[in-house]
Amino acid sequence: MRGAGGTDAAVPGRLDVRDLTVSYAGITALRAVTFSCGPGEVVGVIGPNGAGQSTLLKAVLGLVDAEAGRVRVGGRPVDAVRREVAYLPQRSAIDWDYPARVDEVVAMGRYPHAGPLGRLRAADRRIAAESLERVAMTAFARSQIGELSGGQQQRVLLARALAQRADLLLLDEPFTGVDALTEQLLYERIRELGDAGATVVVVNHDLSSVADGYDRLLVLAGRVVAFGPPERVFTGELLARAYGGVPTAAGALVGDRR
Amino acid sequence: MTAVLHELFVAPAAQYEFMRYALAAVAVVGVTSATLSCLLVVRHQALLGDAVSHAVLPGVAVGWLAAGHLGIFWGALAAALLAGVAITFVERRSTVKLDAVMGIVFTFAFALGLAVISVARPRGIDLFHVLLGNVLGVGRTDLLLTAGSGGLVLLVVVGLYRHFHLWSFDPVMARAVGLRVGTLNYVFTALLSATIVASLQAVGLVLVVAMLVTPGATAYLLSRRLATMMVTAAGLGLVSAVGGLYGSYHLDVASGPAIVIVASLLFVLAFLLAPRHGQVGRARRRRRAARRSVEEDLLKAVFSAARRDSEVSVDTLAGGAGLAPPAARAGLRRLARDAKVRLDGRRVRLTSTGESEALRVVRAHRLLERYLHDAEGVGLPDVHATADLLEHELSPAGVDDIDRLLGRPTRDPHGHPIPSSSGALARIAGHRLSEQEAGAPARVAMVGDVREDLLVRMVDLGIVPRRSVTVLHRGPGRVRARVGDREVDVPADVAERVFVVPDPAVTAPPRAQGAGAARAPERQGRR
């Protein structure tokens, strides 16, 4: 289950990224990124700002064009399994003045599963309500999203991702700008997702909160600096490489690669 | 009255066929463009309608030259689609931003249209009518085309509602879950083009822009959801269109401007009076919130003053609540009117309603302090002021939320008891450190939170709730004490504000058990 290289197993939720290279306007944002993770794993993606973490998530989803490389989810191209993948955008990417209620936003998580004319079934509404309950926001179901605090907004976004009932979840900086209680709650829900057998990839800039809790850490600085269990990755030397910008051969240190 | 209404609204329609056609046409245009305007407004693309409508002009000219009256419709539709597609295409394939692309495309097309008209001088095209509308010239065929395109647009919007909902709220998620966002962009452009062309005769190219922005913006102020926003906008569009047309008929104003003026007046009304976003309501809410905050501060001040002294004067209260005396008196009068306090000359007492409300505020305040200190790491000297600001904003549900998430704490960070949700308040135990006998082991129960400077001193000295403290000897102006593992001098004004309780957990030294130990002045029981 520890996805150390090997074949692109057809396990739902398994993520295989191989030699992924992405460039924007001539600047390489990601260079030959390779890693794999599978069901039950919570992977933290860390690294300095601008090190390509968000780009990695978007490239996995095919939202930015990859120059080279291959992404497989459950052994298949992501286009074939989009309903099994949930993406949580950065909170700042959302217009919170948009006229929508909390319950509507969470119900959007069910849209991919809705019928041909977009009708939500009773089961979809139940799943949306349960997801809202899991982030302790049921009391706010009928609130306007713009009336919420930052932490509450982040909980709503997580509820929407939970409502997708996806095998693979890609969370872009869920902990940025949230209060301490929300951070705790988000963290518990993410851990539960992993324990329930989902694959979870979490972009996290705040190093202080990542030391434990992740099954594996992916240290990114435009390329993979390290990928492995936190106790092995979380060493001063490796972090200095990522944050200090000392150039090293891509992945030379990384046991899990190839 | 009925006669007047009949004269104003029914007679014109009954009398003239052109008026009936015109009414039907503006009704369709009002509803359709208003519905689409919602999507433009929430996507921050209000001026896309502007761009596409101006781009229609060359299509009108070429269509007329090629096929006469009917050619106008198809020429305009083709031009609008072409412009919309060009804008979407250039925006997606270059780094030039949408507003600039729109500016380029629509001025280019508009210039092209003017050039064609100035060269070919087609007789039968009245530029004034194309730009400003000529709704009274709507014929049977025009009406059918308008109703047909309008109905089609509404059908598509309703049928693809969930797609448009997700696409307009979070386009990135829409793409991530596999919605064909590119296709949806083109579909939307087609809807926009069809609406503009359908509106051509009713309001004209220049003013259709208003119908594609204003009703949506007005509804935005009035709605909490996209669906209700669309229905509201459709209603506003209908009222503007029909109202404007009657105004145009009776006052002899051009129909396009009349319709747009009504729509704009509706926006002004909503801007001023909308229940949540309106300026009037906002000012009233601000004033009400300010008053409530004053009243809550006063209740809290009466409550804590009443625990110290039996008589409470207005001036003491004003000081305790941090208010100017006139503001405090006005607030107290309001509280007395609501039967929350009883005023008896210069004395103030809480009624039972007032007391339970005061306890609610105290509970919010102390839970917030607990939260700020434990979860957000705000230092002991600063939590009080921050909680003072936040306590009035917190809803009862929010207070219970914090209580539950913190594991139902019983003390605030200063050691004050937190009232329960039912309003029960534990008694404050202990006595002042300044009165503590030397040698008896004790524990800090509570520190006064009023003087921030003294709190800073306390934290420096290590005097925080639950810390063990033993007075070594009491000198003039200071108390020598062991706090935790340190021996410190505690100034008298600090010792005044620290409350301690005997600490049975610390075993007293063997030679002086029980009460004897407490009385031995110079005992220095080491652990």
Image (tube, coloured by chain):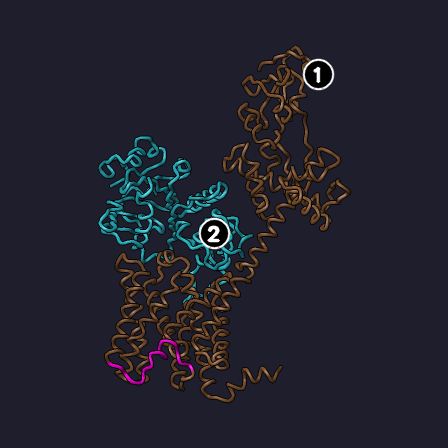
Residue drawn at (29%, 44%) of the image: A35
A198 displayed left or right of B485: left
Tell me the quarter of the image containing the C terminus of chain B: top right
Q: Which residues are magenta?
A: B120-135
- Residue at image mark 1: B515
Q: Report the amino acid beneath label 2.
A: Val
> Does residue B203 lie above or below A51 as drawn?
below
A68 displayed left or right of A186: left
Chain letter of the residue carrying label 1: B
Q: Nearer the viewer, residue A173 or A20?
A: A173
Give residue B185's position: percent from left, percent from top.
34, 65
Q: Nearer the viewer, residue B95 or A198?
A: B95
Q: Nearer the viewer, residue A156 or B305?
A: B305
> Does residue B36 lie above or below B130 as drawn?
above
- Residue at image mark 2: A156
Chain letter of the residue carrying label 2: A
- Magenta region includes residue B130: yes
Tell me the quarter of the image containing the N terminus of chain B: bottom right
> Does residue B217 lie above or below B502 as drawn?
below
**Count the marks: how many?**
2
Find out whether the residues at labels 1 and 2 contact each other: C-beta distance under 8 Å: no
Which chain is assigned brown? B
- Helix, strand or loop under label 1: helix
Residue drawn at (65%, 10%) of the image: B511
Q: Report the amino acid beneath label 1.
A: Ala
Residue drawn at (70%, 16%) of the image: B515
For the question of whether residue A113 can be seen, the reply is: no
Locate residue B498: give its quadrant: top right
Which chain is assigned cyan? A
Give residue B398's position: percent from left, percent from top.
57, 47
